[in-house]
Image: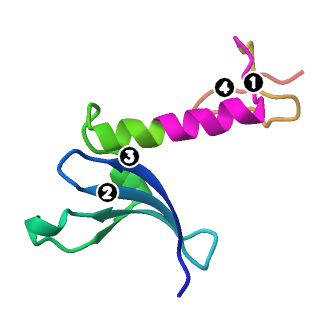
Amino acid sequence: MSIARKLIYAASNGDHWFLCVGEDPEDVFVLHEPNGPSGGRPSRVELSTFLSIGADCPERLALLGMIRSLVAASGATVPASSSGPEPGAAGAEPTPGEMVAST
């Protein structure tokens, strides 16, 4: 099995976190490799789990920074404000019992 990986963060204690993609393009996860002296084993962390860890966690902040730089490099922009749904978007369905005005 071939896994592509990119370093997200290297801690001062020797732990490393990598953003990984498996053979299936939808198989995206974080691999934590603990430092040798700790005796720990590498562990796979699902991306949603990794992003939900503590807000000040340096490895999480590093991944968010990596994502920000990818978006910035793509030149993607978001409108400053939105006054309504996208053109062509479906409207909300009335809730049960709500009166629907007919024309």
Residue 51 tag number: 3
Question: Would residue 85 be seen by someone viewing this image from the given angle?
Answer: yes
Give how far apart the Cα atoms at labels 2 and 4 are.
58 Å
Decide which of tag 4 and tag 1 comes sooner along the chain. Answer: 1
Q: Given the current orientation, which residue lies at the most extreme bottom position?
A: 1
* Mark 1 lies on residue: 77
Q: Amino acid at mark 3?
A: Leu
Q: Nearer the viewer, mark 2 or mark 1?
A: 2
Disc nearest the viewer among 3 and 4: 3
The magenta region covers: 65-81
Q: What's the colour scheme?
A: rainbow
Q: CA distance from mark 3 to mark 1?
A: 23 Å
Which is nearer the N-term, disc 2 or disc 4? Answer: 2
Q: Amino acid at mark 1?
A: Thr
- The quadrant of the rendering that contains the C terminus is top right
Which of the two discs, 2 and 4, sits closer to the camera?
2
Image position of 47 (left or right of 89): left
- Residue corresponding to mark 2: 16
Q: Residue at x 28, y 44 (%)?
A: 53
Q: Which residue is mark 4?
A: 99
Report the front residue among 78 and 61.
61
**Which element carries disc 1, helix, strand or loop?**
loop
Q: CA distance from mark 2 to mark 1?
A: 32 Å
Q: Earlier in the sequence, mark 2 or mark 1?
A: 2
Q: Residues within 10 Å of mark 1 (few under 14, many from 20)?
A: few
Left/right of residue 62 with respect to residue 69 in the rendered view: left
Instruction: Report, in whole angstroms, how far the alpha carbon at label 4 lies from the one at label 1.
Output: 39 Å
Q: Nearer the viewer, residue 49 or 93?
A: 49
Nearest the eye: 96 or 12: 12
Q: Nearer the viewer, residue 36 or 49?
A: 36
Q: Position of residue 102 (x, y in %)?
A: 84, 24
